Image (cartoon, rainbow, N blue to C red):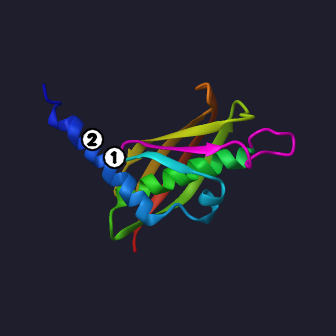
Amino acid sequence: MSEPASVDASAAERSEGLEWAAQRGMGALAEKMGLRFTEFSVDRCVATMPVEGNTQPVGLMHGGAYVVLGESLGSMAANLHAGEHRLAVGVDINATHTRSATSGVVTGVCTPVHLGRSITVHEIVVSDDQGRRCSTIRITNMIKDR
């Protein structure tokens, strides 16, 4: 039995989104921190980042590293939504850290809260290897013409 067309379209969208993200690049900071996109579409973006190399002196994941992961996901998702001749730029970001990862990788899952013509809002939930929420980030991007 074949899968419904909507499932195939979603898989195609995710594949196209990953190709778009790879062509665009993540930026030098995200690359230095070891971000890796694993899923990328307008509706959901996922990336991982190693804890090692992104810690405070006491061995805990640095709060700013969570924010870099969140802003990278949210801004890239907003730019995918904006389209080819428009640019999304961050205008507000906040984060609440509720747990500290100490090893392994963290995973950020970015979902849209609002996708408008001029403003986007995304929530990024960052979890550790055991699936425990470590940080919740919310980013607002303004979309403008290039």
Q: In percent of the image, x 59 and y 48: which residue is there?
A: 69
- Of residues 138 and 27, the one nearer the viewer is 27
Whole-Å distance between the Cαs marked 1 and 2?
6 Å
User: What is the quadrant of the N terminus in the image?
Assistant: top left
| 127 with respect to 14 (left or right) | right
The answer to whether residue 80 is above or below residue 1 is: below
Q: Residues within 10 Å of mark 2 (few under 14, many from 20)?
A: few
Amino acid type, label 1: Arg
Cβ atoms at labels 1 and 2 below 8 Å apart? yes
Q: Helix, strand or loop at disc 1? A: helix
- Of residues 111 and 144, the one nearer the viewer is 111
| 56 with respect to 27 (left or right) | right
- Of residues 86 and 3, the one nearer the viewer is 3
User: What is the quadrant of the C terminus in the image?
Assistant: bottom left
Q: Which residue is mark 2?
A: 10
Picture coordinates of residue 53, whole percent (x, y): 74, 49
Q: Helix, strand or loop at disc 2? A: helix
Amino acid type, label 2: Ser
Query: In terms of image quadrants, where is residue 87?
Result: bottom left
Picture coordinates of residue 125, whole percent (x, y): 55, 36
Q: Which residue is mark 1?
A: 14
The numbered dot on residue 31 is none
Q: Is residue 28 magenta?
A: no
Q: Is residue 118 visible?
A: no
The answer to whether residue 106 is above or below residue 132 is: below
Query: In terms of image quadrants, where is residue 143?
Result: bottom left
Q: How many marks?
A: 2
Q: Which residues are magenta?
A: 43-61
| 83 with respect to 61 (left or right) | left
Q: In percent of the image, x 36 and y 60: which residue is there?
A: 82
Q: Is residue 31 visible?
A: yes
Picture coordinates of residue 85, whole percent (x, y): 33, 71
